[in-house]
Amino acid sequence: MKMIENWFSERYSDNLQLSFRIKDQLLSVRTDFQRIDVFDTYDFGKLLSIDGTVQLTERDEFVYHEMITHVPFYSSSIPVRSALIIGGGDGGAAGQLLSLGVERIDNVEIDNQVVEVSRRFFPDLAGSFSKPGVNLVIGDGVKFLRGKKAQYDLAIVDSTDPVGPAEGLFQEEFYRNLKEALRPGGIAVTQSGSPFYQPRALEMAYRGMRSVFRNVRVYTAFIPTYPSGFWSFTMGSDAEFSSPKGVRVGRYFNGDIMRGCFLLPQFVHEIIGD
Amino acid sequence: MKMIENWFSERYSDNLQLSFRIKDQLLSVRTDFQRIDVFDTYDFGKLLSIDGTVQLTERDEFVYHEMITHVPFYSSSIPVRSALIIGGGDGGAAGQLLSLGVERIDNVEIDNQVVEVSRRFFPDLAGSFSKPGVNLVIGDGVKFLRGKKAQYDLAIVDSTDPVGPAEGLFQEEFYRNLKEALRPGGIAVTQSGSPFYQPRALEMAYRGMRSVFRNVRVYTAFIPTYPSGFWSFTMGSDAEFSSPKGVRVGRYFNGDIMRGCFLLPQFVHEIIGD
C-alpha cells in the first residue's frame, strides 16, 4: 500500500497497481492480525483495505457478496437452513444469506477489529450481525471447526488471500474439517483468487476441495476492484449440484449467471487441469 | 496518460488509474489522428497505447482478439468466407480470422501509423497483413462502407472507444451501412466498452444494432488490462444466430465460453434494457 498525495494504490505485483483517488482516509489501524484502512474514494464510495488489498467498496461489494452466497445456495440439493461463514467480518455474506431465508448462521471472524470497523463505516453490511439468527463468533475459524460434526447445510470461506492470517484456510486438513462440519449433501465454497494473477490460489483451492469432496466446481465473476477484475470461487459437495430454474435476481446474480458462471475460459480449465 | 518515473498509467476516470511498471518507452508519436505509445512493461510484455488508453498487451491480447472473431464466426448461420474489419490496425483480428479459415479479408484502418507501429513492435500480429487473402486499406471505415452492397459474411468493428476518430462508428447511420455491406444472413459485431465504466457506449452500440438488425446479442469477456477487466461486444444479424456444438479451442475461447459469454449479469441486462 502506498499513499501519494490523495491516492490509495493497491499493488497487484511489483509492476502493476490500481489507484483510487480519495477524499479522505477515514481510518488506519494495525490490529493483532493485520492492518486495516478505510478510505472515502471518489468513484467507489467507502473502501475497506486489509494489508493493502481492497476487500470491498460500497459500489461493487454486491458482486462478491451475491456470488459467494447465491451460487452455492441455489446449487444445494438440500434446503439451506443453517450456514457457517469463516471470515466475512464485514457482514456482507451473512446479510445475503439472511435475504435468501437462511435461518441460522455462525459467522466466525478472527479479527474483531474488522467487525468494529465495518459496524462504524459499513453499517448496511455489518447490520446483519445484529439480526436474529446470526451468531457472530470472534475466533480462529480453523480451531472453531475442529469437532464440529454435521451441523451446517452450507459453509462459506470468505477470507483474505492465502497469505497472512488466512493461510490455514487453504490447506487440505482445513477442507477435511470443513466437510466434517457439513450435513450430508451440504456444500462448501471458498473464494479462490484471480485466475489471471493468482493461478496457484485457485489450483490450491481446487485440489484441496477435490481431495475431500466428490464433486467440485469452479465459478467466476467480474469484480472491478479486485486484481484483474476477474475472480474465482471453488465449491465442493458429495451430493450432485442442483440447477434450479427459478432464482431470485440480484444486482449481479440472475438465472443467466447461475448457469454462465460455471462456463470457464480455456486458461482457467488449464489451471485446474480438468 | 501520465509518466511518473518508470510507470505508465491509464486514467480510467479522474479518480481511478491502472499503472504498469515499464522497462522502457519504445515509441511515442503523434499522428494525424491520435497519439500512439509503445511501452515495454514488466508484467505484460509490450503494450500499445492510443491516446493514453491500452489497446493491447502481448500477454492478454489473445482474449480480445479471440472473442471479437470466434464468437461471431461460430454464431453465423452462413459459412464465413469473406470479412470486413474496420479498425484492427494491429492485425490481431485479421490473424484470428485467417486461423479460422476465412478466405478474404478487407481490413480498413484509418491511421497508417498504427499499422507501421504494429509491424515494428507486434510483428506476430501485424504479420497477418502480409498473408494471402488479407487486403489492408488505409482509410476511413465510414467512407469505405458507403456503396458497399452484400459483399461480406462478417463485419467486425475493432475500434477505439467512441471518442476521437472512432466516434462515427457508434452512430445509427454507420450500422445501417454496415448492414448493407453484409450478405443476407451476415453478422456484424462491435466492441462496445466496459459495461461498468462505460455503460453508455454499450447502450449506444446496442441501440444502434437494434435499429437495423432483427437479432442482437451482447456478450462479454474478461480482459485484465481494459478498464474494470470486463468488456462487452455487441453482435447483430437478420438471421438467427447459430449455436455450434464443436468449436476450435483457443487460449480463452472454447465451447463453454461460446455459450457462457452471452449469459449476462443483471446490471448489464439493465443497461441494455432487455
Image (cartoon, coloured by chain):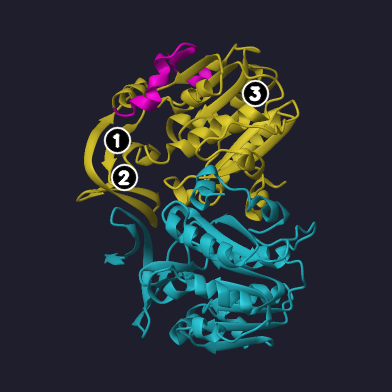
Chain colours: A cyan, B yellow
Disc 2 + disc 1, Cβ < 8 Å = yes
- Mark 3 or mark 2: which comes first in sequence? 2
Does the rendering let one see residue B162? no
> Which chain does the numbered disc 1 sit on?
B
What stretch of residues is rendered in magenta? B121-143
Residue drawn at point x = 55 percent, y = 19 percent: B84
Secondary element under disc 1, as helix, strand or loop, is: strand
Q: Horizontal and vertical percent for residue B64? A: 49, 37
How far is mark 1 from mark 3, CA to CA?
33 Å
Q: Amino acid at mark 2?
A: Met
Viewer-proximal residue among B205 and A66: A66
Say which of marks 1 and 3 sits in front. 1
A153 up-or-down from A76: above or below: below
Say which of marks 2 and 1 sits in front. 1
How far is mark 3 from mark 2, CA to CA?
35 Å
Question: Residue beneath label 1, please?
Answer: B37
Question: Residue beneath label 3, please?
Answer: B176
- Mark 2 or mark 1: which comes first in sequence? 2
Viewer-proximal residue among A263 and A27: A263
